Amino acid sequence: MFVLVVGGGKVGYYLTRELSESGHEVVLMEKDRRRAEQIADEIGSIVVAKDGCEGSALADAGANRADVVAAVTGDDEDNLVICQMAKHHFAVPKTIARVNNPKNEPLFKHLGVDELISPTRMILGSIEQDIPVHELLHLAPLSHEFELVEAQLTVESPAVGRTLVQLQLPSGCSVVALVRDEIAQAVGPDTIFRAGDKVIAAGRAECEPALHGMLIGALPAA
Amino acid sequence: MKAVIVGCGRVGGVLAAALDATGHDVIIIDLLTRAFDRLPATFGGEAVRADGTDENALRRAGAQGADVFLALTEGDNRNIMAAQLAREAFGIGTVYAKVNDPMRAQAYSELGIGTVCRTTMMVDALLGAMSLPLGSEPSVRSGAEHDHPPIGIVAAAAPREG
């Protein structure tokens, strides 16, 4: 796979190194010449000292044959434009943008960036995983509007003692798997949920209140 | 006509004053209050200190319902982002971004954003001053010329080489 990484900060540097070590073809674009030379000294001559926002520089770096373009600079507007240029002008199949300011996420999604990487969201996600309250845990964002969530069933859970069919999940979400006694298993039509089960579900964000109601219990009134 | 201008630099400031002087409603936005020193004392429009790439800030500044939106800061990408917000979040019909990279200017005009490219504009002016034939690239492109898909669904461009 040929990956074009734009932005030679810490994220871009480690990403390039990892991809290169795992055998992928990688080119890193970093506009600061000194920083570009410093990285090239460490990881070899796969660094282009040019501004990845410039159309001609993207072309020189091989954007027209890239499988993936990852825009990971510290400036959201640059990351947006790099991804849009890659997609529109160079027909790159997959574009990934680092989104530094969470307020930009809806716009970036709307404007067609394939994947968003948000440091804020990641940190929030890991904090949530450490909180031992009975809530839906956000395991990972899937493509665009989909989220992978986990619910630990307690005796109060409306799902306990019932099957998936009896639960009548809202359309747009699906139970993916069940972890019972530390063993992951598929959820069949006859599987009856028990207290202590961990249920992994995928669905759109707007299904969350319904999922919460069925797997954990009704949300407390606001 | 209600016009929103982002970036009170030389171009933005002079244009805001000119539109105001001819009776239009002008809102000019800049990150720095001292940029508004460029406006003449007679300026009767609104000068708002705000981030033109922030949807909520644009809404507070009164961008809703504008007839034209002009993003004229010194950053090509900031202008592009502001212009796309104006079009997608506020539905403003006439949207222009100053984009000094000719390739980006062309790409975004194909996505429906009007672009003004100072690079080609000055090159053409200088070629003209020397009585030489002008370049083939237009310096002003209205995004409306192209039969473009909605920005969010960006179709694949020309066939890929290599």
Image (cartoon, coloured by chain):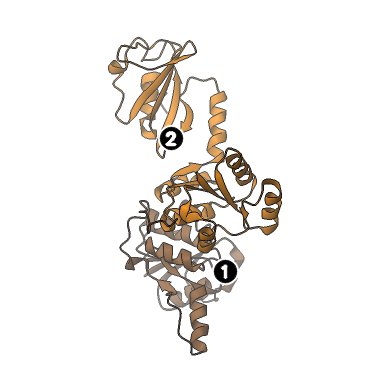
Chain colours: A orange, B brown
Q: Of circles 2 and 1, which is in front? A: 2
Q: In the image shown, does B149 or A51 lie closer to the viewer?
A: A51
Circle 1 is placed at which residue position? B36
* Residue B37 x, y percent position in the rendering: 59, 71
Q: Quadrant of the C terminus of chain A?
A: top left
Taking B147 as reference, is B57 left or right?
A: right
Q: Few, some or many C-alpha atoms within 10 Å of disc 2 (few <14, some 14-19, many ≥20)?
A: few
Residue drawn at (36%, 30%) of the image? A207
Vertical relation: A128 (above or below) B94? above
Q: Which element is circle 1 on?
A: helix
Three-letter code for the amino acid on which mark 1 is drawn: Phe
User: What's under tag 2, amino acid-wise?
Assistant: Leu
The residue beneath circle 2 is A142
Question: Mark 1 — on which chain does it sit?
Answer: B
Q: Secondary structure at mark 2?
A: loop
Q: Which of the chains bears the disc numbered 2?
A: A
